[in-house]
Amino acid sequence: MKCSDKTVLGSKSDIISTVEFNHTGELLATGDKGGRVVIFQREQESKNQLHRRGEYNVYSTFQSHEPEFDYLKSLEIEEKINKIRWLPQQNAAYFLLSTNDKTVKLWKVSERDKRPEGYNLKDEDGRIRDPATITTLRVPVLRPMDLMVEATPRRVFANAHTYHINSISVNSDYETYMSADDLRINLWNFEITNQSFNIVDIKPANMEELTEVITAAEFHPLHCNTFVYSSSKGTIRLCDMRASALCDRHTKFFEEPEDPSNRSFFSEIISSISDVKFSHSGRYIMTRDYLTVKVWDLNMENRPIETYQVHDYLRSKLCSLYENDCIFDKFECVWNGSDSVIMTGSYNNFFRMFDRNTKRDVTLEASRENSKPRAILKPRKVCVGGKRRKDEISVDSLDFSKKILHTAWHPSENIIAVAATNNLYIFQDKVN
Amino acid sequence: METDYREGNRMWEEDSSHKHLLDTMFARGIKRKCFDGEEDIEGTLAGFKSVPSYNLQRQSLLDMSLVKLQLCHMLVEPNLCRSVLIANTVRQIQEEMTQDGTWQVINAQNAGQASLDRLVSSDILCRSTKEQGEGKLIPSYSSFSKDFEDIQSQDIISDLSTVASVQAPRNPQSNVWEMENPQENRANFQKSLDQIFETLENKNPNSVEDLFSDVDNSYYDLDTVLTGMMSNTKMGHCDVLESFSSQTSTNSNSNCKSDINELDHIVEILVES
């Protein structure tokens, strides 16, 4: 796949912490460390420029979360947006869920392009008219105005999570959603903010016995009773909410047996799953751990059907990566619209794509220096040892502060969004 | 971070020439690299430190992990996943060291230790975490840094409502702690593991829920949220409560006051301890 038509949208300061297309791909939302949400909208394709795909421009910006202070623990609650999930569109307005560590919010984003004029009791500036001057009655009319996009918080779902929320997922029934923290998963109804149902609880009676946490969770895209959650021990559990109110017993348990030849003190850490995603078809799940991406068939629990090496050259550097904490970086992974290609990020602003059918993979880089707008991205290669070819980069030269943790793929087209620290890159497939 | 990584990288270089018994994760550690770009140091002269053994490498990983666990208490709020993974790594090392008997033989200095002492120390350290947890936490704080004090106070709140438990296990432990440093470190890290999870968990959920029941839920109402959002200033929790209480609603005032009373109550407990 060739990439071109790059749009670079740099935000002033904050590190982007989540990226998500809506269900049509018309909108792209980003959340950042400062609690802001920025929504981009794809411009309408004009007849004049058939060869030019719609570009994404800023549509709305709002402050979703503010920093809070937890007095009980004397700790600050970060305003960083951990996840954004869109609701399917049901009317003219757009709805999305955004969450920080503790609180989920439902935001309504709507357009206003008309305003009423001709009030009786106040004039156009809003000042109250002197009743003595009112001699006639008139009916206010709607007149066009400059388009204004406003975001309003419609629901705030708070006080349900003791631990940090890592995932939210909208159910296919469009009435409920779940939020998952390190030890618990709660089910919410969109209309009810003061109650949630706890559907998974892995907190041990004695916290000293804690050895495993929940790392990600997602609803099945089609079956509203099914969801999966991944753990820090590299396992995935599929649960059916019809079985019982508290889904402590899984319906399916996915775990790959450990490779004894690769065993080390870091084995568990690198097996910790940082992201889990259902395929659009609902037949597969994809998991990301530190060095690989795996595709699992829901019907086979004992091992994945595909394993892709993201950056295996780091396997010999694990001790250093443990020392500088990079080994705990949580990379996300995404499917393309047809579930034929998967994508995930790496270091040095590299991101990787794997074609499941052709088994080909490519490494690309998201950086201003190395690509100009409208240029085709050049595949990159990391050389492991021995002689380094001209365009290759050696493992020791990789910049581990430049990590691509968050990426998104348009639901139907080959358009991808890549968050590189505080810059957002949008790449589109080249059209000839 | 980039610089740090490269420094670390020099310490742990890929080693394909030596065979280590267990894993290649600990390649030869090279403390200083005198020759830039030199790949093979097998034939190097004196001036380099000797190649550390697997045990020493494992030891340094253990020490690094303990430092990480301690450091995480100083952060805004510790990342539970990271803490659990590090703690599991520490346990794994501990188990391995216990199994191959290196636990007692910490280093050459301790060669003269009475065998009984070493047995005691391993007994304490291998004791089930449950027993460890039952001991009161307060006496053990003395050996930890000041940064723990905030977390101590919170523990005390929960301890006030939990039954004071067994004191006996503490005595042999204190004997262990008076021993040579390395063994003290061993005892300390076992304690660390327990305490880390004690401090990470939400204290006594019942009391927390009671507290929250008094909190003014209208903070989360649309109006209040909008007020907070639209004013576009960074407001802490307290500020929002104050701005809320400035509104005419008496309901909010009384709830706000009860919230502040709860805080006073907590502060009293903290101060008295």
Image (cartoon, rainbow, N blue to C red):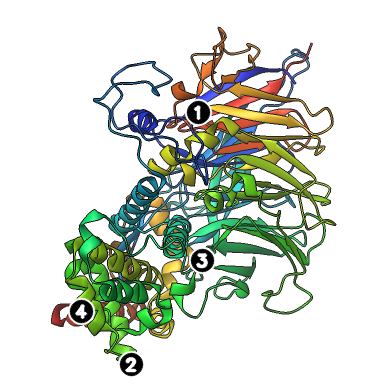
Question: Which chain contains the residue that carries disc 3?
Answer: A
Disc assigned to residue B163: 2
Quadrant of the image occupied by residue B103: bottom left
Pick the residue in front: A239 or A139: A239
Q: Earlier in the sequence, mark 2 or mark 4?
A: 4
Q: Nearer the viewer, mark 2 or mark 4?
A: 4
Task: Measure how far apart labels 3 and 4 are at the Cα level.
Answer: 26 Å
Image quadrant for the C terminus of chain A?
A: top right
Q: Earlier in the sequence, mark 4 or mark 1?
A: 1
Q: Which residue is found at the position 51% from the left and 50% from the top?
A: A82
Task: Measure how far apart labels 2 and 3 are at the Cα level.
Answer: 25 Å
Tag 4–tag 1 contact (CB < 8 Å): no
Disc assigned to residue A125: none
Rendered location of residue A4, percent (x, y): 67, 16
Disc assigned to residue B139: 4
The answer to whether any part of residue B126 appears in the image is yes
Q: Secondary structure at mark 3?
A: loop
Question: Which chain contains the residue that carries disc 2?
Answer: B
Q: Earlier in the sequence, mark 2 or mark 1?
A: 1
Tag 2–tag 3 contact (CB < 8 Å): no
Q: Which amino acid does the dot numbered 4 rest on?
A: Pro
The answer to whether any part of residue A404 appears in the image is no
Rendered location of residue B224, percent (x, y): 42, 64
Disc assigned to residue A211: 3
Asked if residue A251 lies left or right of residue B229, the reply is right
Give the residue pinned by disc 1: B17
Task: Measure how far apart labels 2 and 4 are at the Cα level.
Answer: 16 Å
Q: Nearer the viewer, mark 3 or mark 1?
A: 1
